[in-house]
Amino acid sequence: MQKHTKIFFDFWNDEFTLAQTYQCFSCSSWEGTDIHHIEPKQMGGSKCKDHITNLTCLCRKCHDLCHKSKDFNKSIQAKTLRLIADKLEEKLELGYEHR
Ligand SMILES: [Zn+2]
Ligand SMILES: [Zn+2]
C-alpha cells in the first residue's frame, strides 16, 4: 500500500472504503476509483502533499475531469474539506461519548 493510500485509508476508515475499494467523493461511484492529489505532487515535494486535506478519492470519470478542469478540481477540494471537517467533528463527538 502506498503511503498516501494508507493516510487516506486510516482517516476514512470504512466510511468511503470497502476492503480495498474506495467510493468516489464526487458521484459516489465505486468504479475505477483512485486517490487523487488535489494539489499535484511535484518532484522533491511529494511528502507534504500526502496530507489528508490534499487527498481525495475519485472514479475514473471525475478524476479525468479534475485533471482537465481547474474549477472542477477546486469544487472537489471544497467538498473534500467539508467532508473532512464533518468527519473530524464526528470523531470528536465519538470521543466525548467514551468519557
Ligand atoms: Zn465520480
Ligand atoms: Zn489525479
Image: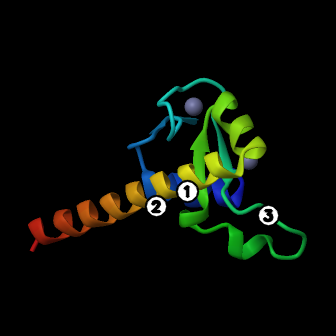
Which mark, residue 44?
none
Question: CA gap, disc 1 to disc 3?
Answer: 15 Å
For mark 1, does the 10 Å Cα neighbourhood hold few (<14), some (14 to 19), or many (20 or more) residues? many
What residue is disc 3 on?
Answer: 41
Q: What residue is at 31 percent from the left and 59 percent from the top?
A: 86
Q: How many labels sit on residues?
A: 3
Amino acid type, callout 3: Lys
Camera-side residue of 79 and 87: 79
Image position of 82 with respect to 92: above or below: above
Q: Are marks 1 and 3 in contact (CB under 8 Å)?
A: no
Q: Nearer the viewer, mark 2 or mark 3?
A: 2
| Position in image of residue 63 (x %, y %) | 69, 38
For mark 2, does the 10 Å Cα neighbourhood hold few (<14), some (14 to 19), or many (20 or more) residues? some
Q: Residue 37 occupies which quadrant of the picture?
A: bottom right
Q: Are marks 2 and 1 in contact (CB under 8 Å)?
A: yes
| Position in image of residue 95 (x %, y %) | 19, 69
For mark 3, does the 10 Å Cα neighbourhood hold few (<14), some (14 to 19), or many (20 or more) residues? some
Q: Residue 92 occupies which quadrant of the picture?
A: bottom left
Amino acid type, callout 1: Gln
What residue is disc 1 on?
Answer: 77
What residue is disc 2 on?
Answer: 81
SS for dot 1: helix
Camera-side residue of 79 and 42: 79
